Amino acid sequence: MFQEASDMTGITVYLERMAEVAGLEGQPERLVRLFGAAMSLHTKLGDAPYQAEPDAYERKLLAARAQLGEGAYDLAWAAGQAMTVEQAISYALEGSDRDGPTCQRE
C-alpha cells in the first residue's frame, strides 16, 4: 500500500478519508484523532491539510469540537498528533471493519 511505497502524501490523504468516514459514522473522537495524525504528516511534508476542500475540513473539525467539548477534542487532537505513521495507519485500519456509528473505541 502507500506505506510500502513511502508515499507520505498518499498516506495523509488516506488518513483524511478515513477521518471523513469516522465523521459519517458518528465517531467524532476518531475523526479528530485521524485528522490530527494527518495534520502531523502535513506539517512534516510542509503542505496544507485537506487541500481539496479546506473549508470542509474546518467545518468537520468545528462540528466534532461541538460534539466532544473542548477538553475531549483537545485530548483527541493531541493523541492523533502524537501518533507515528505506523500507529496512524493501524488506527485507521482498525475502524475499517466497524459495523456502524454505535461502535465506540476504548
Image (cartoon, rainbow, N blue to C red):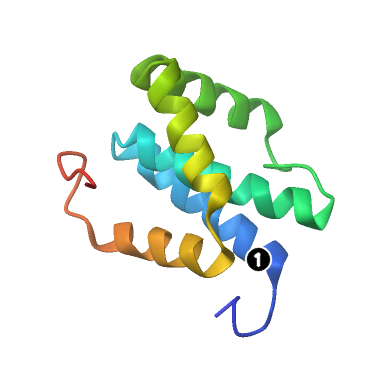
Residue 45 vs 61, above or below: the answer is: below
Residue at disc 1, secondary structure: helix
Foreground residue among 15 and 56: 15
- What residue is drawn where x is 16% and y is 53%? 99
Residue at far bottom of view: 4
Measured as percent of width and height from the top left, residue 30 is found at: 38, 42
- Where, quadrant-wise, is the N terminus in this rendering? bottom right
Q: Residues within 10 Å of mark 1 (few under 14, many from 20)?
A: some
Image-based side of 57 in relation to 52, left or right: left
> Which of the pair 19/33 is nearer the observer?
33
Left or right for 36, reference 33: right
**Which quarter of the figure has residue 71?**
top left
Residue at 77 percent of width and 55 percent of height: 44
The quarter of the picture where residue 36 lies is top right
All told, the count of numbered labels is 1
- At 54% from the left and 43% from the top, the residue drawn is 35
Three-letter amino acid code at the position of disc 1: Gly
Q: Nearer the viewer, residue 84 or 14?
A: 84
Q: Which residue is mark 1?
A: 10
Q: Residue at x 70, y 32 (%)?
A: 54
- Counting from the top left corner in percent of width and height, residue 47 is at 82, 48
Rendered view: 14 above or below 59 = below
In the figure, 101 relative to 42: above or below?
above
Residue 95 at x, y = what percent?
31, 57
Q: Position of residue 14 (x, y in %)?
A: 55, 59
